[in-house]
Image (cartoon, grey):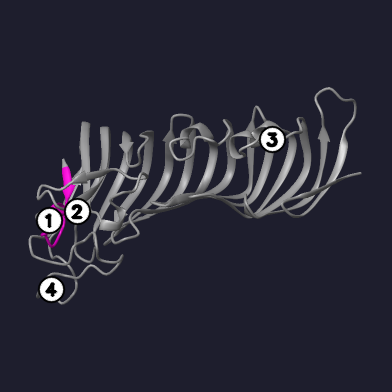
Amino acid sequence: MTLERLPDQSQINAVAIFLGVPSPDSLLVEADTLPGQEGDGGQGPKRSIILRGAEIIGGTLDILLPLPPERRGSERILVERAPDGDSYFRRMTFRDIELELEQATLRAPGQRGERFEVSRLSMTGEVWPEPFRVTEVEGDIRREGGRLVADFKRFGLAGSQVSGQADVRWGGAEGIRLAFRGDADPLSLEDIFFLEDRLPAGRARGPFGLDLDDDGFALSFQDTELDSELGQITAQGTLAFGDGIEFGDLALGLTGVDLAVTDPWVSDTLPLRGFLDGDLLLAGTLDELELTGRVNLTEPDSVGSMSAAVDGVDGLVVFV
């Protein structure tokens, strides 16, 4: 199945099927502003279209959205040439779909967009250059204009189990925007290597947020616990990835953290080796990094540890 809006069409094909009358493109209308049909007094359709107990086995869904010219050269998204040969689509493909719907309300009086009560969903997604696998989903999803809002009881990846709310928006030069707020129990960092493969292997537990668009993504932490072979970290604040890395008042509580965790992020390996315990606050970028805190460094071949006060731009380290 393909959901698409060709450059010369006024609305996406699925909307044309279910609304049956010309209306502003549902993929370009802002959330909660879909108009009612002509002559209905703005109250929406008078009839309902409801599916109960529907299933999809081994399905494939292609979503094709018109792509602004300035996005055609992006390496972060999947691009496909349109049939006219001159314009381009942003392509998102979901394969191996296994879906069980308790109920899907495609149309109802007073309802804008569609509502889906998902009891089971698994699939492989191709949205960015690296595919990802969703192993299980349970929750409620609704579409309102150029917006998809979901309340997930369970959202599973290969090694992850999270719950929370997602808000997905699309259309215009900004492309796809995702905001997720929820809890991880756990979130395997390997499951988001398709976004950034320099993250350390490990697991996060507790409240977290993910904001993602075509230019990068940001992780936000609320006393989130990160556990890996390179040590344990408790994090509060934001870590953003785009053309570079930016720290948004990221407070870290460190327990036995191996300095090797920094190796993927720096051009030259740090001259020190060992393990850190203590607290750090990071702000800014790697080029203009502000560090404050106090840590203890234990070198692998030493007895005892050194205490360091860290303060200032680029991290002036004072051992005492």
Which residue was labeled with disc 3? 232
Q: Describe the element under mark 2 as helix, strand or loop.
A: strand
Which residue was labeled with disc 4? 40
Residue 258 image offset from top left, x and y in percent: 71, 31
Disc assigned to residue 106:
2
Labels 2 and 1: the sequence-earlier one: 1
- Residue under the image location 30 percent in, 67 percent down: 32
Disc assigned to residue 18:
1
Q: Please state the extent of the stretch shown in magenta in the rendering.
A: 2-15
Mark 4 touching mark 1, by CB under 8 A?
A: no
Looking at numbered disc 2 in the image, what kind of residue is underneath it? Leu
State the separation of the CA atoms marked 3 and 4.
Answer: 59 Å
Disc assigned to residue 144:
none
Crowding near the residue tagged with mark 4, few <14, some 14–19, many ≥20 C-alpha atoms within 10 Å = few
State the separation of the CA atoms marked 2 and 3.
Answer: 47 Å
Give the quarter of the image for residue 268.
Answer: top right
Labels 1 and 3: the sequence-earlier one: 1
Q: Is residue 61 left or right of residue 140?
A: left
Location of residue 303 with respect to 71 vertically, above or below: above
> Of 211 and 172, which appears nearest the observer?
172
Foreground: disc 2 or disc 3: 3
Image quarter hosting the C terminus: top right
Location of residue 276 with respect to 211 vertically, above or below: above
